[in-house]
Amino acid sequence: MDIDKIDRRILGILQADGRIANVELAERIGLSPTSVGERLKRLQRDGFVEGYGARLNPHLLGLGLLVFVEVLLDKTTPDVFERFAKAVRLAPEVLECHMVAGGFDYLVKARVADMAAYRRFLGDVLLALPGVRETRTYAVMEEVKRDAPLPMG
């Protein structure tokens, strides 16, 4: 699935403003609204656009603490990986979870209200996940850059 420079420009604009009207998008690209609409439908159909949503302010919603947690499993077998992945997907506090190579198995990004809420989340959720042997937590003191768009260069 190849995309050209125009498709990349469309994707770049959509990352910045997912609510842009098709007519305005077409004007910015320099094509007809029909042509841009067809391209956009193809980009969505082919999976380049996975969805649309609003960026919310976590602090105003009472979710001021962002943490990254290294998770080390007791065994690294397909069954343990599968059970852990299935269970972690059910935790609403977990924003992202990535299997990584290196000194631990997963890197979890989670948001909670405060350190007391994190302590409850750690004990009730993270440490109760299948196969978890050890965790290391890194509390974020300042978010320097977040929700960055993908480079479309």
Image (tube, rainbow, N blue to C red):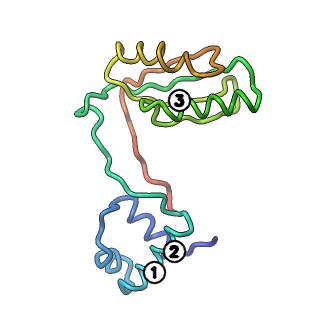
Judge whether 91 appears above or below 41 on screen.
above
Mark 3: amino acid: Val
Residue at left offset 66%, top offset 24%: 104
Residue at left offset 44%, top offset 53%: 149
Residue at left offset 31%, top offset 27%: 64
Element marked by disc 1 = helix
Task: Look at mark 3 in the image and give the residue it sits on.
Answer: 108
Report x, y in % for residue 102.
70, 28
Element marked by disc 2 = helix
Task: Look at mark 2 in the image and give the residue it sits on.
Answer: 42
Element marked by disc 3 = strand
Q: CA distance from mark 1 to mark 3?
A: 38 Å
Whether residues under marks 1 and 2 lie with C-beta atoms below 8 angstroms apart, the answer is yes
Judge whether 83 appears above or below 53 on screen.
above
Report x, y in % for residue 97.
55, 34
Foreground residue, 67 or 42? Answer: 42
Mark 1: amino acid: Glu
Report x, y in % for residue 4.
56, 75
Foreground residue, 147 or 92? Answer: 92
Judge whether 4 appears above or below 54 on screen.
below
Report crowding for label 3: few under 14, some 14 to 19, many 20 or more residues within 10 A (C-alpha).
many
Mark 2: amino acid: Arg
Report x, y in % for residue 93.
42, 29
Q: Earlier in the sequence, mark 2 or mark 3?
A: 2
Whether residues under marks 1 and 3 lie with C-beta atoms below 8 angstroms apart, the answer is no
Task: Look at mark 1 in the image and give the residue it sits on.
Answer: 38
Quarter of the figure with the N terminus: bottom right
Q: Quadrant of residue 133?
A: top right
